[in-house]
Image (cartoon, rainbow, N blue to C red):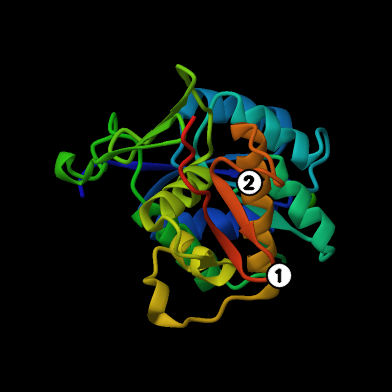
Amino acid sequence: MSEVRVGLVIEDDQDIRELVRVVLSQAGFDVHTASTGSAGVTSARELNPDVITLDLGLPDIDGFEVARQIRKSSDAYIIMLTARAEELDTLMGLEAGGDDYLTKPFRPRELRARVEAMMRRPRASSDSRSVPEAADPEVSHNGLAVSAGSRTAVLNGAELKLTRTEFDLLLALLETGRIVRTKADLARRLRNEPYDVGSYVSDADERAVEVHMGNLRKKLGDSIQAPRWLETVRGVGYRLAPASSN
Ligand code: CA
């Protein structure tokens, strides 16, 4: 793969910033760093990075707000690095637009594994790393048109602004229809693992799937009680809502 992948590290702690920079460099990224939230937002806009690591505790702008601002201009994968162990912070970070998170202290190997799993996931067709055209069935369901190749979801003539994680989850449900996907299945899907590999999925990872699904439901304007797309199977997972006749 000849194309240079760009990574952005937003972190005020110099030691951690250097550690993350080295991990991303070793994973083949051209790495840029920012030590404040505002510098990070600017760099994200200018560099169009593939992956961003975002410290939640920054000196100027709250990390959640940084994520929200980055999301206005970027579809980079955002991994949040949080010193706060509280699960609420993690979930708020995902709601603000993060794709994944790691709690400090983390093992460099774990960060590298997360980044590489993300980079194996396909990107939009304007990108040279996209899936081949042959793998681009356009799927339509209850008025929502989704193209796997161009990574677009169009509802009522307007393209939805989904994060890559939200798009991948939507696609997973469209592919399997009325078959229920457990939260663990979907967490594995986000790691680019086969559903049946049986690898460990933590409670926190399952709750992360719930948050992404909640974000996706909001963007679709879907209803929990009478869903057109995302049907929750209580205590189990999710499946595609039935096709409606109107
Ligand atoms: Ca910090």
Give the structural element (helix, strand or loop) at label 2: loop
What residue is rendered at 41% in x and 72% in y? 195
Residue 98, label in figure:
2
* Badge 1 element: loop
Residue at position x 71%, y 44% in the image: 95
Residue 221 visible to the viewer: yes
Q: Position of residue 216 (x, y in %)?
A: 60, 41
> Does 41 sit left or right of 122 as displayed?
right
* Residue 3, placed above or below residue 44: below
At a point 49% along the width and 58% down the height, the residue shown is: 22
Q: Which residue is mark 1?
A: 105
In the figure, residue 125 lies in which quadrant?
top left
Where is residue 3? Give x, y as percent. Answer: 25, 41
Residue placed most toward the observer, 33 or 157: 157
Are dots 1 and 2 in contact, CB under 8 Å? Answer: no
User: Which of these two is toward me, 139 or 118?
Assistant: 139
Residue 54 image position (x, y, % from top left):
65, 46
- The foreground one among 91 and 38 is 91
Farthest left residue?
134
User: In this orientation, which residue lies closer to the viewer: 103 or 178?
Assistant: 178
Q: Within the image, what quadrant is residue 141 found in?
A: top left
Residue density around tag 2, few if under 14, some if 14–19, many if 20 or more, within 10 Å: many
Q: Can see residue 78?
A: no
Which-is-in-front pick, marks 1 and 2?
2
Question: Residue extending furthest front?
Answer: 245
Instruction: Write the residue at 56% across / 40% down.
Output: 228
Residue 111, percent from left and from top: 54, 64
Please say if 125 is above or below 78. Answer: above
Q: Earlier in the sequence, mark 1 or mark 2?
A: 2
Which amino acid, by three-letter code, is at mark 2? Answer: Gly
Asked whether mark 1 and ligand 1 are closer than 8 Å, the reply comes as no
- Cα distance between the residues tagged 1 and 2: 19 Å
